[in-house]
Amino acid sequence: MTDQELPHFRHQGDAVEIPVRAIPGSSVTAITGVRQGALVIKVTTAPEKGKANVTICEVLSGTLGVPKSSVRLIRGEHHRDKIFQVSGVSPEDVHKALIQV
């Protein structure tokens, strides 16, 4: 991912808010790019009972190298367009991690 392809994340205190476009029920679980400023994350889990949201948290925590407890959904629980908040990281940390995807 290049600098121009990075999502429009926002710094909030000791956390970063990352917009995500979720694509549940996919054949793979992966970050596949950026669409309209949001990180596109495909997950194999179904969008039922929050399973896809949990998988997205796991993808973000693994990619950013933070515990799963540091990632939480703050908006869009029942929608494709979501905002996740990641605590304990700086915008620079997020930038470095996503540029390697």
Image (tube, rainbow, N blue to C red):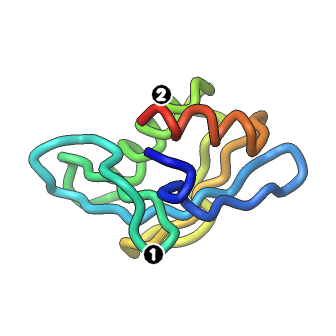
Quadrant in which residue 34 is drawn:
bottom left
The kind of residue on which mark 2 rests is: Gly
Q: Residue at x 73, y 61 (%)?
A: 10
Q: Nearer the viewer, residue 15 or 48?
A: 15
Tell me where residue 12 appears, x and y as whole percent: 83, 57
Residue extending farthest left = 27
Quadrant position of the C terminus in the picture: top left
Which label belongs to residue 62?
2
Q: Note whether 91 is above or below 74 in the view shown.
A: above
Crowding near pointer 2: few (<14 within 10 Å), some, many (20+)? few
Q: Depth check: 99 or 55 in front?
A: 99
Location of residue 84 with respect to 64 vertically, above or below: below
Whole-percent x, y for residue 85 in the image: 66, 52
**Circle 1 residues within 10 Å: few <14, some 14–19, many ≥20:** few
x and y percent of residue 97 in the render? 56, 33
Asked which quadrant contains residue 50, the reply is bottom left
Distance from Cα at disc 2 to Cα at disc 1: 23 Å
The answer to whether 96 appears left or right of 92 in the picture is: left
99 vs 91, nearest the viewer: 99
Residue that numbered label 1 is attached to: 36
**Left or right: residue 77 compared with residue 65:** left
Q: Earlier in the sequence, mark 2 or mark 1?
A: 1
Task: Determine the residue positioned at 75% across, 45% down.
Answer: 91
Q: Residue furthest right?
A: 13
Question: Could you tell me residue 94's position as x and y percent?
Answer: 64, 40
Local SS, label 2? helix
The kind of residue tagged 1 is Gln
Per the image, label 1 sits on a secondary structure element best described as loop
Q: The N terminus lies in which quarter of the figure?
A: top left
Does the residue at mark 2 contact the one at mark 1 (Cβ under 8 Å)?
Answer: no
Label of residue 65 in the image: none
Q: In this rendering, which labeled residue sits more in front, label 2 or label 1?
A: 1
